[in-house]
């Protein structure tokens, strides 16, 4: 099956700086890669996603990049704010296995 | 448009008991997946239901079972509860790719 690895496990940045979280996957058949943000005690919320036919996608301060050859994708948050502090999870999905595999999560702390 | 809903919000059970958790998917979604999330970890896939059948299953014992109804809502049943079953149980619904999570049920087994 698929294996998704996520780094770093914790990330601390100063408000206004950028944050980058990286994930790698093992199955080349994976074709959809969402990112979720989970605040303490709340549900994971879909914040951005990318499909395998696209290399980059942006939504305001958030962007995701995908390198299919290297089998890795990254979440980029610019101009970080304290409310960006949360745990972020990446995931991979493929038509052949029909389920999501999640990374282990990155705890982002944005210091004011 | 209602999102994914789950009930109950919290539940406390004793070892050996059985529990049933419920999920209503987002409008227009026909696929429901269940996840177990232990404290400080990512969601672990339990199983997925589509057209009232279990389509995929993760590495969970047979004590974990489920059901999907004609209106796409779903139940997760756990028998012979163990202390290690204490976790946040998340339901997620999807139509094609995008998957949305419910608020979860916090299960505590004592």
Image (cartoon, rainbow, N blue to C red):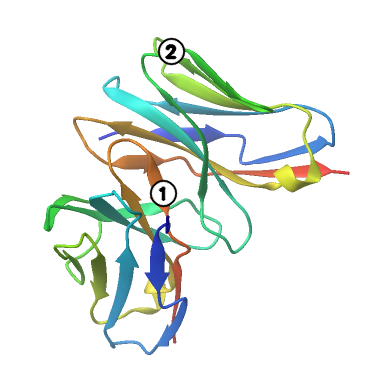
Pointers 1 and 2 within a single chain: no
Residue B74: where, in percent of width, then height? 24, 65
Are there few (<14), some (14-19), or many (20+) residues within 10 Å of tag 2?
A: few
Relative placement, left or right, of B106 versus A19 is left
Residue A79: where, in percent of width, then height? 79, 29
Compared with A17, B27 (above or below) is below
**Any part of residue B58 in sight:** no
Residue at point 28%, 87% (across, down): B16
Can you name the residue that lies furthest to the top here? A69
Q: Quadrant of the C terminus of chain A?
A: top right
Compared with B59, B88 (above or below) is below
The quarter holding residue A50 reads top left
Badge number at residue B78 = none
Q: Which residue is mark 1?
A: B100
Q: Which residue is mark 2?
A: A70
Compared with B89, A54 (above or below) is above
State the SS at label 1.
Answer: strand
Residue at point 14%, 62% (across, down): B70
Can you name the residue that lies furthest to the right here? A112
Give whichever of A19, B32 is nearer the camera: B32
């Amino acid at each position: 099956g698929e294996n998704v690895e996520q780094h770093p496990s914790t990330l601390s940045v100063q408000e206004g700086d950028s944050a980058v979280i990286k994930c790698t996957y093992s199955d080349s058949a994976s074709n959809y890669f969402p990112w979720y943000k989970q605040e303490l005690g709340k549900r994971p919320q879909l914040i951005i996603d990318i499909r395998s036919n696209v290399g980059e996608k942006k939504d305001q301060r958030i962007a995701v990049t995908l390198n299919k050859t290297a089998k890795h994708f990254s979440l980029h948050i610019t101009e970080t704010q304290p409310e960006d502090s949360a745990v972020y999870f990446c995931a991979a999905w493929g038509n052949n296995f029909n389920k999501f595999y999640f990374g282990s999560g990155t705890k982002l702390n944005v210091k004011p | 448009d209602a999102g994914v809903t789950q009930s109950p919000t919290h539940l406390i059970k004793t070892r050996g008991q059985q529990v049933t958790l419920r999920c209503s998917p987002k409008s227009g979604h026909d696929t429901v997946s269940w996840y177990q999330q232990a404290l400080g970890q990512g969601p672990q896939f339990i199983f997925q239901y589509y057209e009232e059948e279990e389509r995929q299953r993760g590495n969970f014992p047979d004590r974990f079972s489920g059901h999907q109804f004609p209106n796409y809502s779903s139940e997760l049943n756990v028998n012979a509860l163990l202390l290690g079953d204490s976790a946040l149980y998340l339901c997620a619904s999807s139509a094609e790719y995008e998957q949305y999570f419910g608020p979860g049920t916090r299960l505590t087994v004592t």
